[in-house]
Every structure is written in structure tokens, then in C-alpha cells.
Amino acid sequence: MILSPSLLSADFTCLGQEVEHLETAGLGWLHLDVMDGAFVPNITFGPPLIKALRQRSGLFFDVHLMVEGPARYLADFKAAGADLLVIHAEADRHLQRTLCAIRALGCKAGLAFNPGSDLGRLRWLAADIDLLLLMSVNPGFSGQSFIPQSLDKLRIARALLDEANARHVPIQVDGGACPENTAALLEAGADVLVSGSAFFAHKPYDARLATFMAAAAACPAHTARPSLAEALTWRHHRDAPCA
């Protein structure tokens, strides 16, 4: 399992120190929720903050674009230091083109679905994504309760990817993930868990990471999935040229 803590739940008075503490604690990924106040009812941050954090961190930046018309901003987020750019199926009219544009910039391309969105179009886009993100809460705010139906949706998503010869594509779950439901999420097909308040509210971070990993040990079969093996190879390359 990979844990990707959501910066939205970190201490905003010392974000630079927070990301440094995550790296010291043994985390490899950081989830960055970009919200525009239009696609979701909240406004967070944009490329300038990500660029500032990149100067202090070698974490893999997992950038979740909860914005309308994300294609307009791809180059800016790449230049800021994003490693993975995730766009929403509901927010872009030309998904296949935008996913290809993300890859052309040198980033991993991710596709996200809201809780009420059908996964049918996934079969036509599986070849163009590096990661699938399933929202298990309605996007916009941290601290929400996990939607139970997400487990069934996760199983269906894993089956769709496998049928589309995309067994290597990892699935990320965002919303309500905690040690108590970690094993169930992994069993259903998740590889990467995003955790906000359930992670940042429990210091020290190395101990909290150990708690999540101990919970993951209850589902040892997930470690054999090609999708997890693929995601575990992803790193931030400090010398990669900016767009």
C-alpha cells in the first residue's frame, strides 16, 4: 500500500515544515488538492504554493485538479513540480486529449470519478491513464465520512481495468480512508490511499504511518497486484526539466 497524505489537513501555518516532516517520517507521496470554487464548493491553492513546497521536498507530488477545464492549467502545474496530474471525468469535455497532454508534459496522468459518476467510460480511457482515482466522499472538504458504496464501486473499477488489459494501473481512493477501513479498501482493489484528518491529526507521523501499514498487513494479497508494483516505482525526479 501507498499512503498519500492530503495537504489540505496539514497545519497551514508551517507547510514547509510539514512536508519535510512527512519525508523524514518515511512517506513517499503527498496529495495536493487543488480546488477552484466552481467544480467544488471550496477554494484551496494553485501552482505558486506547489512550487514553493517543491523547493523543500523530494516527495512524489500527487496533484488532484478539482477544477473546471483543467487542460488550461496543465503546463503551470507541471512547471510548479507536479509528478502526477489527476483530472475529473466530470470537469473536462475532451478527456482523452487532456490525458494525452498530461503525458506529453512528462507527468503521470490520472482520471478521477465522483461518488455518483458511472464508470462506463473507463473502458475507453484505460489505455490513456496511469492512475484511477475514486472519490469515496463528495469532493470539496476534508473530514467527511466514507461512503460505504465505494467498496462495491472499487471492485467494479478493478474488474474494468483488468478486462481492459490495464492490470498495471493503480487505483487511488480519496475520502474517509483510515486504519479501520484500510484492509477492506485494499481487499476491494485499492493500491493508494489518500488520508487527510485521519493522518494529520495523529502525530508523530512516523507512528501514524506505521499504524496504517499494520492495518494493510491484514490484506497481504494486495502486495501481489501489478498495479501496486507499478505505483511503487514512481518517484520525483529532481533533475526533470520543467515545462
Image (cartoon, grey):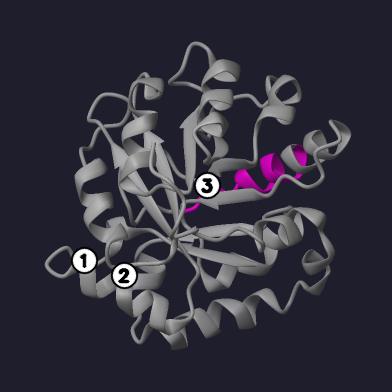
At mark 2, the secondary structure is helix
Callout 1 touching callout 2 (CB < 8 Å): yes
Q: Residue at x 73, y 77 (%)?
A: 218
Position of residue 147 in the picture relative to residue 119 (left or right): left
Q: Which residue is mark 2?
A: 19
Position of residue 49 in the picture relative to residue 96 (left or right): left
Q: Which residue is mark 1?
A: 15
Q: Which mark is residue 202?
A: none
Q: Is residue 59 depicted above or below 79 in this figure?
A: below
Span shown in magenta: 146-156
Q: Which mark is residue 147?
A: 3
- Amino acid type for the residue under numbered disc 1: Leu
Number of numbered discs visible in the structure rendering: 3
At mark 1, the secondary structure is helix
- Amino acid type for the residue under numbered disc 2: Val
In three-dimensional space, the C-alpha distance between marks 1 and 2, rounded to whole angstroms, equals 6 Å
Residue 14 percent across, percent down from the top left: 16, 70
Position of residue 163 in the picture relative to residue 117 (left or right): right
Q: First in sequence, mark 3 or 1: give its number.
A: 1
Depth check: 106 or 177 in front?
A: 106
Question: Which corner quadrant holds the C terminus?
Answer: top left
Q: Residue 166 sits in which quadrant?
A: top right
Q: First in sequence, mark 2 or 3: give its number.
A: 2
Q: Residue 34 sits in which quadrant?
A: top left
Q: Residue furthest top?
A: 93
- Amino acid type for the residue under numbered disc 3: Ile
